[in-house]
Structure formats: structure tokens, C-alpha cells
Amino acid sequence: MTRILHISTRLILGGSQENTILSCEGQVGLGHEVHLAYGPIYGPEGSMLDRVRAFRTIEAHEVPHLIRPVRPIADMRAYRELKALIDDIKPDVVHTHSSKAGILGRLAGWNARCKPAVVHTIHGPPFLPGKVVSNAVYTVAERFAAKRCDAIVSVADAMTRQFLERGIGKPALYTTVRSGVDIEPYLTSHPTRDEVRERYGIEPHEFVVGTVARLAQDKGHDDLLDALGEDLRANEHWRLLWVGDGYLREQLERRIGEMGLDGRVVFTGLVPPAEVPGMMRAMDVLAHPSYREGLPRTVTQALLAGVCPVAYDCDGTPEICRHKQTGWLIPTGDVGRLGEAIRHLAARPDERLALAAAGREVAGREFSAAAMVAGLEHVYREAMAARDRRRRGSL
């Protein structure tokens, strides 16, 4: 049995958080003792804490000062809280997730008296286009943190390339472990496509372009309105189904009204992860015009549900959405081609089904939660061996 402590900044509804919790659940299933530390949960994105608490064998720990914004005083307190927690639990492995928890958690684990193996997962790029100063700060911080861990897990090969290009760590430090999905709920037929559509006032014959994402910057909701505004006005049987919530909702609703698209876009609000498979089945095409991604679990989920994705060629996205093999891949930000691809697929249901069927096979083989947990087992063994070498070197 291995004692594992995962550290995540916020347990909001999101891909990296679901990845982390699936990892915890799988590791409990293998007989490990699993702890999960997290910062205060706030905002409109929803919380996954109830799921953690329902899985009673995961020990949850709130870290009061672990917050997302950079706040030097709070960050120092969070570091001390994490270090005290690590020395109290005495884990064999500290596994950090997300930028803030990744930097503070790695430093706390590296300096803890109990000397655990320290592992970090890159779920997505922390570097923002045009943000020269903040990107430089993140690069320095990530270089510093990379020297204080035994292994780095990338959810996509693209993440490893981006970090190495910035001089963060050495190639031997990195291992790709795909972000896994609980496959079985996507392979069933309950609730059915028509049942989910009826719940949201969508007719069985209507063409539905769906998204599953926070209503936040860089997720591409405005791009979809630009790409499909004329189509939605011209085709009364077309709908957008937007699954999720976020701080941009009021702004998007206002723009939809200004475009004369009232009633053409369905907002579901926050949806528990258990309901996402049904939402996917209600779609004809999944649109994922995101400008920043690690590896988009939404695309994997759509393929498992038998739905063809159209996505921007961004970061790790092409590792699951392979152009004209498992979906359509669009140059990032090319709104014109985004609309063209969706119109093309709207007119060709057989092509949509063929692409989704090919993608389902790839997703089931390479992106299962079981494969992810098995990959982490290998990483942990290597990290603990590196930790032991560190211990011997310090004697």
C-alpha cells in the first residue's frame, strides 16, 4: 500500500479536477491510502467536493490559504499549511495539480521532514498569449519547481514540448499519462438522446451543436456565435446547447439577444458530471473552440458517446481530435472555417457517425480511467526510486 497526497488549488467542476478525483478513486481501488488537499471553493463554476466526500475512503483536507490569485502573504501561509499537512500525513507520494498548488505543493513536499516522492501533473498551459510579464514570472516559477520534484506527468505530449521549450526541467523528468475518462457511462443509452432533449425543449429532429465548458474567457463561445449566427437565424431547427456556467454568462446572454438569437441557444447551467454523458448524447456535433487546453476531456467524452467533435487545433487537442479521422480540427481562431466545418457535418450525418465511431475506438483504448491510473502507478514507482536516491545522497 502506498500513502498518496494529492494537492489541487480548487475543486471546481473542471477537467483537471475530474482527472484528479478519478485518479484518487482508482488508487483507492488498488488498495492505496489516498488524501486530497484543496483550497477554498468559490465562484459560479460549481464544486466537486460532494463527490469526494461521497467516496468515503478519500480523506479530504481544506487548506485555508490555498487560493488561485497570486497573494504573497496568503501564499506563504498556504506553503506552511501544506508543509505541516505533509509532515502530519507522512505520504509516500505528494502529487500536485494546477499551477498554484503545483508550485507551493512541490516546494512543501520537497522540504518536508518525511521526504516524500514529489510528482506534478501539467493539466494545461499556464502561459497566456500576449501576457509577457506574467508568462515570464510563471516560467521562472515553473523552472524553480521543476527542480523540486521527482517526476512530471503531462496529460498530452504537447504540454511536455511547451515546457521543455521554456527550459523547464529535463526530458527524463516527463512522462505522458493521458487524461482518463470513466468510460462506461458514455457507452450506455440511459438517459436517451430524446429524453435529454425533451428536458430542454429541443425537438428530436433539430440539429444541435453542443459545448461542455465553463462560460469563461478562451473557451470560444463568442466564436461559435460569430461562426453560426447566420445559420441559427436561417435554420429554425438549429440549436446551440451550452452545458456549464461561469462569469461570462450574462455577457453572452446579452449578446445573444442583440443578435436576435433568443431561443436559439439553450443554457443548461451547472450540470453534475454524472449527467454529462446524457448531455453528450443529445448533441449532433460537439464544438470545442477553446484557445487553451491540456488534453480536452470533453472531446474524448463526445467520441465515447458517439458524437463527432469540431475543435480548434490547440495544445493537446489534436492528440484526440485527429483531423478527418476522429473529428474535424480547425486552425485556432479561424471562425470562418469553424462555421464551414459545422455546416459540412450538418449536411452529412453518415460522415459524423463514421468519425465518431473511429474516435470511440481510440478513446476507449487510450483514454480510459483505468489506463490513467495504471500509468500513474508506473510514475510513482519511478518517483519513489528517485526519492530513495535523493535520501541516500543526503546521508
Image: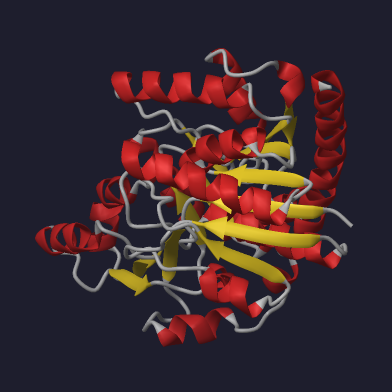
Would you say 17 lies left or right of 153 here?
left
**Residue 352: x percent and y percent?**
60, 55
Please, is residue 256 above or below residue 96 in the view?
below
Would you say 237 lies left or right of 173 here?
left
**Which of 205/27 is in front?**
27
Count of number-bearing discs = 0
In the displayed image of the protein, which residue is found farthest to the left?
Answer: 258
Quarter of the rendering occupied by the N terminus: bottom right
Residue 76 visible within the image = yes
Corner quadrant of residue 276: bottom right
**Which of 100/176 is in front?**
100
**Which of 109/102 is in front?**
109
**Residue 123: x percent and y percent?**
57, 41
Residue 361 visible within the image = no
Please, is residue 25 above or below residue 105 in the view?
below
Quarter of the rendering occupied by the C terminus: top right
**Residue 90: x percent and y percent?**
73, 51
**Residue 67: x percent and y percent?**
39, 50
Q: How is the image coloured?
A: secondary structure
Residue at x-position 35% and y-position 72%: 269
Corner quadrant of residue 390: top right
**Which of 253/20 is in front?**
20
Residue at x-position 27% and y-position 69%: 264
